[in-house]
Amino acid sequence: MNKLSALLLLCLLDIAGAQPIPDRPEALQFPKLSWQPPRFERVELPGGAVLYLVENHELPLVRGKIMFLGGAAHEPAERAGLSALTMHVLRTGGTAEMSAEELDEALEFVAASIETSADADRSTLSFDCLSKDFDDVWAMLVDMLEHPRFQERYIDEKKKQMLEALRRENDQPEQILMREYRRLLYPDHPYGRRTDGEEKTIAALSRDDLLAWHKQLLSPSRMLVGVAGDFDARDIKRRVRQLAENWPYRTVALPAVPPLPQPKEGLFIFEKPIAQTSLILAHRGPARPYPDYHAVQVMSFILGGGSFSRLTDSVRTKGGLAYGVASFFAYGYKRGVFGAWCQTKPTTSYRAGELILSEIERIRRGRRPPRAATGQRLAGQCFIFRSGSLTSTWAISRSWRCTARVQFLDDYMDRIQRVTAADVRRVAEKYLHPDRLLMLYVGDSWPLRPTPARLPTGRDRGET
Amino acid sequence: MMQRDDARNADTHPRSGDTCPAPGQRVLSPVRAASRRPLPAARIAKMPTPPATTSPRCALLALLAFSLLPASAAWKMPPVHEKILSNGMTILVIERRASPTFHAHIGFRAGSAYEKPGESGMAHMLEHMLFKGTRVMGTRNYAAEEPLMARLDQLYEQLDAARAAPVPDASRIEDLAAQITSVENEQQQYIRSEELWSLYQQNGGENLNASTSRDITNYFLSLPANRLELWAWLESDRMQAPVFREFYRERDVIAEERRMRVEADPGGVLWEALFSAAYTAHPYRIPTIGYMSDIENYKRPAVERFHTLNYAPNRAVVVLVGDLSAQKAFAVCEKYFGRLARQPDPPPILPREPEQRGERRVQVLFDAEPHVMVAYHVPPTGHPDLYALEVLAGLLSEGRTSRLYKSLVRTQEIAVSAHAFALDGRDPGLFIFSGAPRHPHTAEEVEKAFYAELAGLIHDPIDERELQKVKNNLQADFIRGLGTNMGMAHALGYYAVIADWRYLETFLDRINAIAAEDVKRVARQYLTPANRTVAIRVKEEKS
């Protein structure tokens, strides 16, 4: 150690040691921390594709996602499961250049992964590899996107797996809850369907269906690419541009998603004799973009978004009724959902639902107005912190997906900070609708019979 | 619990279904529970989906075959700075300037294996209680709270006894419950609920949580780089003088956690049954979350005793990874944690698991489709044979080209999932097979197929390329696992507590040295019929 660093060390030790430990942590002083969030590069390509890049050379890895707007919501009811099957076998069924077996072997030998999926609104390919293998992995994924082989054998295999998944879909209460509450929010609508289809529709899907749907589903005009890691940005831009420009198929519009139906309201019970009831209160919520988004973020944190939210305090800490309890505003493509859920033993399932309901009412009308500051700090701090990670590309791509507003990141913090207590109260009244809730219980129904008067009494009261 | 798939609980909640969670919003409130081994998590996360074989044919493939791993092989773990404070507390620091943040991890050698009979789950209960504040944090007036908590201890003692009576006296129970409510309400006026979480989060804390496993209890979070002293203040405060307020209410919360993780979860039920049967003497047989009857009867003084005994600085390892200087970090730790007094070690865990002499089978009825798990006793972390067992798990279960996937899922089509993994620990752990049959095939068919694969692996030659593939994956997973401050801190903390953090420095070299013959040998030696426990979940049809 040279003299200078020894001196520095002494100073540091002194700084740490000289001040007495204060009685409370708030008395601590912190050195200033100046930090610019990492810059994301956004490139718009002719034809509509958009690329986001974050270069980061710390680890010899490249990770990325190629996302296409459009998914299961666009498929006809009698073809339910088509997008999921197409995207799955896109990966597992081989390509023009390589058989399914060769592809798996090549990827796994170098510990690389390419995986695909489809949900209601998006069809996605994601990849993760060591940077030294990126050339090869990119070539494989382009081949996969453009020229999937859809080997029959792997179509058949996936169909069998989807059928088994159907058999197993009532094993987990949470899985039932998720499936059923969507069905109730979007009755007889693609958003209410299982994206993996039903027994009959799965059985009917053929290789020709996949070939045709692939050409329609994937189009560079609806493509968003995010790549992060150890690469040269110019190289990635060139690759993505080529992918978009050399796309071998003509863009065909996807069938429109039908207009959203009237959601169900009232109490619903999915009978499952089990030690713990899962329950959710939900209604449809605002879709992004909308001007109150930031105020709703803050309000949502106060109600049920953090570990010391009102719901946690009431249902968990003071009530001892649940381990997990939270509420959320979630956003899909041109749609949104508000929900609040918890899991509790059957004997307290009524009480827990009632407590959640009263917290929803309290944040709208309660005597003690919500303090904006708490939610603001949370919404703000968490966000800043997350933007520091390699995965932030996905945050951006998600926001793009939801808002088509890319300046989202730039003004997020400002807008959060401008939210006032009055805003919180106003958006709580505007976007929370205790009178329009659906309330779904998965568990033992006996504690709810006869149906308690306090729970929502919508016109669709019934059982699922 | 330390289930592999704990993350599932966070992943499958309703909100994740509806896409596009808002930035910064958390899914579960405190997921304060179980943990798994830090490193293999990466590998487990990318567990099988699908399969296929064949030899290289096209040019691309040939190219890949020869580009082994130069880039990643060059990647080395950054240097670890180590200091042991005079009270015995270990401080490990990795300086890493990728972002102006750091991750702080404290691990105590105090998992569920250190519990006494009747106190199952107490390590986990203690973990929850450490979020309830101290004499300074979480209170408006500790002096006023103290007598109320003592009164609650008495009342709950009476209530629990009354409830346990052969013929419970309903009116007495009601009376006690009323008194309790009144005292709890009185205490409420002094409580600042969740002040620690709140303060951390308002200072930019992220990933704030804690976890309990069989060997270790962890407390961790990420903070902006300039908040090191805040962390040291809060953590040394709660190590030194935690106050277990709202204790009895938290018993109910943990009971709900147990219902969520075990009683209403088909995977949790099976896992618990497997461990209860595989271990007969060693405390790994006890579920980390605890038995319901123990949870319902925890008493505050008992948990305080557990804390005093197990949370000594000489049983703690602090790991700091991020934008800090090691010397400064040591100084801050000395200043804050140096205040804590060294304590005598608690009695060691004495029971050793006797050699298993014959197969054990258990069956669990549950309202869910069937599943099978097969577990074999294997040596603890640090034992040389574990490296070969890791490679064995890779051969069997890493990816679509793994043997179990290719055979059970792809070729025979009898299963929808089939995995194998080594679960290590401070004491001897388990090597586990896990599979879900595809209707109309049965759990027993999947079980038989596991044994057939095992026999093939033992008796047939192992292709060098296949072996190399597994090593490549272990290496890449290792890099991915250590890719974040948090991943690195957890891995260091875990191995520092249960064995030696230097395990990580040599891990890859040891893996690379494994030969096909080593894999066959450990398979022959440990994966024997007499050493196995089979747990099968059977669908229970309720009317």
Image: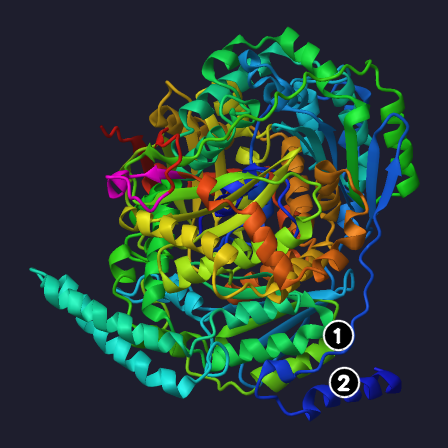
Name the chain letter of the residue that bears numbered label 1: B
Tell me where the magenta segment starts and ends, as one range: A440-455
Residue A454 is one of the magenta-drawn residues: yes
Q: Locate residue A388, reporting x and y percent.
A: 74, 56
User: Are discs 2 and 1 less than 8 Å apart at CB?
Assistant: yes
Amino acid carrying mark 2 in the image:
Leu
User: How far, Cα to Cα, is label 2 from label 1?
Assistant: 10 Å
Mark 2 secondary-structure assignment = helix
The image quadrant of residue A419 is bottom right
Residue B278 is one of the magenta-drawn residues: no
Crowding at dot 1, Cα within 10 Å, few <14 / some 14-19 / many 20+, comes out as some
Amino acid carrying mark 1 in the image:
Ser
Q: Locate residue A185, reporting x and y percent.
A: 50, 32
Q: Which mark is residue A12?
A: 2
Nearest the viewer among B320 and A458 is A458
Q: Which residue is mark 1?
A: B325
Q: Locate residue B55, reporting x and y percent.
A: 69, 21
Q: Quadrant of the C terminus of chain B?
A: top left
